[in-house]
């Protein structure tokens, strides 16, 4: 056929059909081909089965109706712009199938070389190195070319194209670069030194080769031709350079195509900024790409989904494009990202919580976009972050010390509270200016920064933050803190003493260098130069806050009258249904309205509507009442928001006890005036006491009792140096009592009873000179508590009530106890009962005239005679009953351990008399009671038919010898272990009255168990009731000291029971093989901080897999055989520490409906046993396949197969193991981790529905089920 190059036929304006198929034409297709043809005509160009090379000219896109046939050539580049051509191209095939409608991409084929109908896909070639060009019609290799010619003749022709007579040969680096040079206009490059010369390609300008002494000839490492006037489309053959690591073509007007990038197996860095790029189609196939620069291009619309698929990325730059829409949650896939730049686009919406999965991120630059919503709390998990930029006014680096304020960009952006970023030890630059953040600045802001002596920059300008600058920020030595344009109401004095702050400007201008004071302003909201001071405002009430940038009044001062505000309040809290709304909404003054008190000036000073059936949420406008001193809404069904509370500048008393308050965000905004805060009787759901509470440093009285707070009491309580009363009883506070309480010199009442304290009583409590009452007893929480010895509290001259009962204090009572009390004649109350004190009651206590001392339930061995003569002690009982009023003597007992009335004397013990004073029961009495309970248990539960009943009911044998019963050193029952013993019936509730019962194991018995009365078993720590037929867990929450629960193999139905979340000491919870349904929430399990083992397999749980990211102790997790969906979170068990020396971690997620790839984020575990079989996984992240200690060393031996068998294979465990269970081929298995290969046999339409209904009951895996159903329907 015809040979040579192709003319452009540009002078033939009437040409509409050009058919040259099946010739031997070579070279490139001219860029001016038929350029003068009629654009409105139907144009046909058929160049199939020639030897054309290079790229498809992009000028062809101007034709509206083009039939372009190019299959069977050696085309190696095709711009994406052609794939978006008019819908008439190739009879609409391009509109329907995109680029595939023109030509199948390299590595694929079909008989036409393109896709023309829905069923004729471009098929992937199985053999590598075949079908290397666009438009292949078969998967031929280099030696089977259909184009003819000499397959060994490869040369570079004058056109600059590689003329290899049609063979798919492997080209040399010189040939590839020559092709690149001529295709991208090398003759006009700014610098083309040595290109196309005989010198080594390693000496050509912009080419860097390996220089490591290896035998790699012309092993090209880098192509760097930045700003070198390249143009047109670089050939995809660049991706065939086997050692290429870096391509930098920035600032060149090229049309880059990512076709073939899958062959660039070593390419880690690709820089294409400022090239005019409009598409990244195909980039997701890059196998090793880490650094991607796409700044300053013409990318539009959403961030391309393909970007989220490049999981190897560490650095991503996409600034200055035209990206819009939201950031997809798929951003969480990029777990290796270290730098992410997306500033100066048009991105919108809520920031995804999945940003928190980017735990390797050091730089996050999202400024100059249009984000809304709140800051996701998960951002706090980015522990490596150093710079966070989310401001809207455009400052990126924060270097502008003048920091001029953009007031015109302050009506949109991110709202809600400011995160404290306390889990980011490296974050030194934080830019959040010109958003809508509200509430107060957290006291803990950046408090865990590892180096507080370094330069730190925080930009929060032009938000709606309120309250005081936290004094805790003074721990930073060199901070630049920009806060102008907020609602800041106070600057602590010690902040103004940080001379090195603001680049040393605080040393020159004091507080003004941080913020201009109220009533003044300048354009920066602070003074940074001597000639730009804070200027006074002339108008009253103008510039009401610190840091004003103009002299405007706050809108809240001008808008609403007091009556308007109270009407809003009435409506918002359902005033028509209040118990008492007398006079409300009547008259011109609210001063006569029920619950309203006014001052002499007629302004509202007090609102007291307690216990009045209010509901709803009071409006924030309530805080705009300028003279409001007291707000009492306790005992109402209201929620409450503290937003805007900074405006309540006179508020001194706030009572929200027994309401529905759940969050305290923003409460520190009233730090200046508030003196009394009552929040007791609420339910904060096991949350820690917020640091904002301890920022209220002028508080005198703080009431937090009975409010569901948990966790430790922060050391920051020691900052509340005005505090006089602190009531925090009946919560779930844990840990030690903070020593910083010793700083509270004005404290008079400290009530910490009924919590879960541990450790000793800090000596610092003996340094509270004003303390009168100290309560740390646990009268309803037996077991545990404070340990160590009793301080003498001799430095507390005013202490007259001390209650430390029901702890585990030991040693003797100090002779100097309360020795510093100034007034020994006053009534003094001392509660030390139910500890482990020994020795005697000190005779020195006779110094006190009117002492009431409760010391029963200890190991007191003697009582001095002189104390038995203190007639006014014990409210006069000593005068009546002598020593017995103090303690019952050894060998006797009384319910209280002492006599207080004539009707309750100390009684003689018949057997097992106690050797100590103050016994509350006798050994014989207690033993008799316990035996009575055991006898009832025996008769109620079919004891005669038990498998073993050795010694039971034998009066001559102590019950401690009865089968299954064991006792402690005092002969009291400690455990009942009767598992699998044919126990039947209903165990009596009295079994929980056994005081020292710790272990109750009744597993594998057909009983009807009830939890009524379990709260009485205060020592019970282990409860095993698996395989008992249990149907309900109601009441189990009362067993507060349970550590281990096993309720497997029962019949419990419904959603996961909330009752377990009350058991905060729980370490092991086993609920497998029941009938639970619904989803699981990580937030709920956060209430179980001590959980080590969680077994929930073989239920019917649905929804996504929780990440349990806050659990620090959970090392065994079984959720197998459920119906969980979605992907495995990268943050799964993120807080659990693991290394090679640890006991390892166990995770079983087998037989669910989980999808995606097993994430690389779990590679943080060194010793992991993980079962994942029978899900819908695509595969395993390669980073997991080198974990030598995983799956008992199977991963070391078998790589990825030691985790999951790949798709198309199966093994009985779903993975390969040392037990000679190999992954065997099974083409019908579509997913990784299959355990069987089920062939399709004898299927019928009727069988489809039977199979569908019975798949789960038959135990068939979901992967197999999906294949079966698809196969049935295809038949």
Image (tube, rainbow, N blue to C red):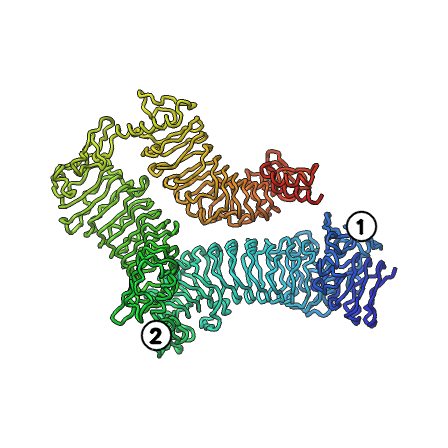
Percent x, y of residue 886: 17, 38
The residue at the point 83 percent across, 72 percent down is 11
Residue 881 lies, with reference to residue 407, above or below; the image says: above
How many numbered badges does the structure rendering display? 2
Q: Nearer the viewer, residue 67 or 758?
A: 67
Q: Are marks 1 and 2 in contact (CB under 8 Å)?
A: no
- Marks 1/2: CA distance? 89 Å
Using the image, tell me which numbered label, if any, was put on residue 36.
none
Location of residue 199 by image quarter: bottom right
Residue found at the far right of this picture: 1
| Lateral position of residue 880 relative to residue 529, left or right | left
| Lateral position of residue 320 relative to residue 886, left or right | right
The residue at the point 18 percent across, 44 percent down is 852
- Is residue 175 shown to the viewer in this render? no
Q: Nearer the viewer, residue 1133 or 1202?
A: 1133
Q: Nearer the viewer, residue 714 or 603?
A: 603
| Lateral position of residue 415 relative to residue 1224, left or right | left
Percent x, y of residue 834: 26, 39
Residue 575 lies, with reference to residue 410, above or below; the image says: above
Percent x, y of residue 360: 52, 54
Q: Residues within 10 Å of mark 2 (few under 14, many from 20)?
A: some
In the picture of the structure, the residue carrying the numbered disc 1 is: 143
Q: Secondary structure at mark 1?
A: loop
Q: Residues within 10 Å of mark 1 (few under 14, many from 20)?
A: few
- Is residue 221 shown to the viewer in this render? yes
Q: Secondary structure at mark 2?
A: loop
**Quick one: quadrant of the C terminus?**
top right
Query: Which numbered mark, 1 or 2, is in the foreground of this view?
Result: 2
Using the image, tell me which numbered label, if any, was put on residue 541.
2
Percent x, y of residue 398: 47, 67
**Quick one: quadrant of the N terminus?**
bottom right
Earlier in the chain: of badge 1 and badge 2, it is 1
């Amino acid at each position: 056929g015809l040979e040579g190059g192709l003319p452009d036929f540009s002078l033939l304006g009437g040409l509409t059909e050009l058919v040259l198929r099946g010739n031997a034409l070579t070279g490139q297709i001219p860029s001016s081909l038929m350029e003068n043809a009629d654009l409105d005509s139907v144009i046909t160009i058929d160049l199939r089965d020639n030897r054309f090379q290079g790229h498809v000219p992009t000028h062809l896109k101007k034709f509206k109706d083009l039939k372009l046939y190019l299959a069977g050539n050696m085309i190696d580049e095709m711009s994406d712009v052609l794939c978006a051509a008019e819908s008439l191209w190739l009879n609409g095939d391009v509109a329907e199938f995109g680029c595939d409608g023109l030509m199948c991409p390299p590595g694929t084929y079909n008989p036409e070389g393109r896709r023309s109908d829905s069923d004729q896909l471009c098929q992937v070639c199985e053999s590598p190195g075949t079908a290397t060009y666009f438009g292949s019609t078969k998967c031929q290799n280099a030696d089977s070319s259909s184009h003819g010619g000499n397959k060994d003749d490869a040369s570079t022709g004058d056109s600059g194209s590689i003329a290899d007579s049609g063979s798919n040969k492997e080209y040399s680096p010189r040939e590839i670069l020559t092709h690149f040079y001529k295709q991208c206009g090398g003759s006009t490059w700014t610098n083309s030194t040595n290109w196309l010369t005989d010198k080594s390609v390693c000496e050509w300008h912009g080419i860097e080769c390996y220089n490591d002494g290896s035998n790699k000839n012309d092993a090209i490492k880098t192509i760097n031709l930045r700003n070198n006037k390249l143009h047109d489309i670089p050939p995809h053959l660049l991706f065939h350079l086997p050692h290429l690591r870096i391509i930098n073509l920035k600032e060149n007007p090229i049309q880059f195509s990512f076709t073939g990038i899958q062959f660039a197996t070593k390419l880690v860095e690709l820089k294409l900024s400022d090239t005019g790029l409009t598409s990244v189609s195909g980039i997701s196939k890059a196998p090793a790409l880490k650094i991607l620069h796409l700044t300053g291009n013409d990318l539009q619309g959403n961030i391309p989904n393909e970007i989220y698929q490049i999981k190897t990325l560490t650095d991503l730059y996409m600034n200055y494009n035209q990206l819009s829409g939201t950031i997809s949650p798929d951003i969480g896939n990029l777990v290796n990202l270290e730098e992410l730049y997306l500033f100066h686009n048009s991105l919108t919406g809520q920031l995804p919580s999945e940003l928190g999965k980017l735990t390797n991120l050091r730089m996050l630059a999202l400024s100059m976009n249009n984000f809304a919503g709140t800051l996701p709390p998960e951002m706090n998990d980015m522990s490596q972050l150093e710079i966070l930029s989310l401001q809207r006014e455009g400052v990126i680096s924060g270097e502008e010390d003048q920091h001029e304020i953009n007031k015109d960009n302050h009506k949109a952006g991110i709202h809600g509270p400011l995160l404290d970023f306390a889990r980011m030890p490296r974050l030194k630059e934080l830019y959040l200016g010109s958003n809508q953040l509200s509430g107060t600045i957290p006291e803990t802001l950046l408090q865990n920064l590892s180096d507080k002596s370094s330069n730190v920059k925080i930009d929060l300008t032009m938000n709606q933050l309120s309250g005081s600058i936290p004094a805790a920020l003074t721990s930073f030595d060199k901070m630049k803190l920009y806060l102008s344009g907020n609602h800041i109401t106070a600057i602590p004095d010690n902040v103004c003493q940080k001379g090195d702050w603001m680049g040393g400007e605080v040393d020159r201008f004091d507080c003004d260098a941080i913020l201009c004071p109220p009533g003044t302003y300048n354009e920066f909201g602070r003074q940074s130069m001597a000639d730009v001071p804070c200027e006074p405002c002339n108008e009253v009430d103008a510039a009401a806050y610190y840091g004003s940038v103009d002299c405007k009044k706050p809108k809240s001062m001008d808008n609403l009258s007091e009556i308007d505000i109270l009407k809003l309040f009435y409506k918002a809290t359902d005033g028509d249904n209040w118990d008492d709304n007398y006079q409300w909404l009547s008259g011109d003054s609210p001063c006569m309205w029920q619950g309203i008190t006014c001052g002499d000036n007629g302004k509202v000073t007090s609102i007291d509507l307690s216990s009045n059936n209010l509901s709803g949420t009071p409006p924030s406008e309530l805080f705009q009442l300028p003279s409001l001193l007291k707000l009492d809404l306790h005992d109402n069904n209201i929620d409450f928001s503290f937003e805007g509370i900074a405006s309540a500048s006179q508020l001194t008393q706030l009572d929200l006890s027994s309401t529905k308050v759940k969050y305290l965000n923003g409460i520190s905004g009233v730090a200046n005036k508030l003196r009394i805060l009552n929040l007791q009787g609420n339910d904060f759901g096991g949350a820690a006491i917020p640091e904002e509470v301890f920022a209220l440093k002028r508080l005198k009285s703080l009431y937090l009792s009975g409010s569901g707070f948990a966790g430790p009491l922060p050391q920051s309580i020691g900052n509340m140096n005005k505090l006089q009363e602190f009531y925090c009883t009946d919560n779930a506070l844990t840990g030690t009592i903070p020593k910083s309480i010793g700083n509270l010199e004005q404290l008079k009442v400290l009530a910490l009873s009924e919590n879960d304290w541990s450790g000793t009583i800090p000596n610092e409590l003996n340094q509270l000179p004003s303390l009168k009452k100290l309560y740390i007893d646990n009268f309803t929480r037996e077991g545990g508590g404070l340990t160590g010895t009793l301080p003498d509290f001799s430095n507390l001259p005013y202490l007259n009530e001390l209650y430390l009962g029901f702890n585990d204090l030991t040693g003797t009572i100090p002779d100097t106890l309360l020795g510093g009390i100034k007034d020994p004649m006053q009534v003094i109350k001392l509660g030390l009962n139910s500890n482990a004190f020994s020795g005697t009651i000190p005779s020195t206590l006779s110094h006190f005239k009117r002492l009431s001392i409760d010391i029963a339930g200890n190991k007191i061995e003697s009582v001095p005679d002189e104390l038995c003569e203190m007639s006014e002690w014990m409210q006069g009982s000593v005068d009546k009953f002598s020593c017995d009023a103090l303690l019952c003597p050894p060998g006797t007992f009384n319910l209280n351990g002492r006599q207080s009335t004539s009707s309750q004397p100390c009684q003689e013990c018949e057997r097992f008399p106690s050797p100590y004073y103050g016994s509350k029961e006798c050994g014989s009495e207690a033993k008799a009671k316990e035996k009575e309970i055991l006898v009832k248990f025996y008769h109620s539960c079919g004891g005669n038919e038990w498998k073993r009943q050795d010694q039971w009911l034998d009066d001559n044998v102590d019950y401690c010898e009865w089968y299954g019963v064991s006792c402690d050193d005092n002969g009291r029952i400690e455990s009942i272990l009767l598992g699998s013993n044919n126990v039947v019936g209903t165990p009596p509730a009295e079994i929980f009255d056994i005081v020292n019962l710790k272990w109750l194991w009744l597993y594998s018995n057909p009983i009807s168990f009830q939890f009524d009365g379990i709260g009485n078993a205060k020592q019970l720590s282990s409860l095993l009731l698996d395989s008992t037929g249990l149907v309900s867990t109601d009441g189990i929450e009362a067993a507060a000291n349970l550590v281990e629960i096993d309720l497997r193999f029962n019949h419990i139905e419904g959603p996961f029971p909330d009752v377990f979340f009350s058991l905060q000491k729980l370490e092991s919870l086993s609920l497998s093989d029941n009938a639970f349904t619904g989803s699981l929430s990580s937030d709920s399990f956060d209430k179980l901080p001590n959980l080590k083992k969680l077994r929930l397999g073989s239920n019917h749980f649905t929804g996504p897999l929780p990440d349990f990211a806050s659990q620090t102790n959970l090392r065994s997790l079984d959720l197998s055989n459920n119906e969980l969906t979605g992907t495995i979170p990268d943050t799964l068990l993120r807080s659990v520490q693991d290394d090679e020396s640890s006991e390892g971690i166990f995770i079983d997620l087998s037989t669910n409906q989980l999808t995606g790839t097993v994430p690389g984020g779990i590679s943080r575990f060194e010793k992991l046993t993980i079962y994942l079989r029978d899900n819908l996984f695509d595969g395993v992240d390669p980073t997991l396949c080198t974990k030598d200690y995983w799956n008992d060393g199977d991963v070391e031996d078998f790589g990825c197969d030691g985790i999951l068998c790949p798709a198309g294979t199966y093994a009985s465990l779903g993975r390969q193991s040392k037990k000679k269970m190999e992954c065997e081929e099974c083409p019908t298995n579509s997913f990784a981790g299959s355990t069987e290969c089920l062939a399709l046999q004898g299927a019928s339409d009727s069988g489809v529905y039977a199979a569908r209904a019975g798949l789960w009951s038959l135990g068939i895996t979901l992967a197999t089920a999906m294949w079966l159903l698809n196969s049935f329907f295809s038949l």
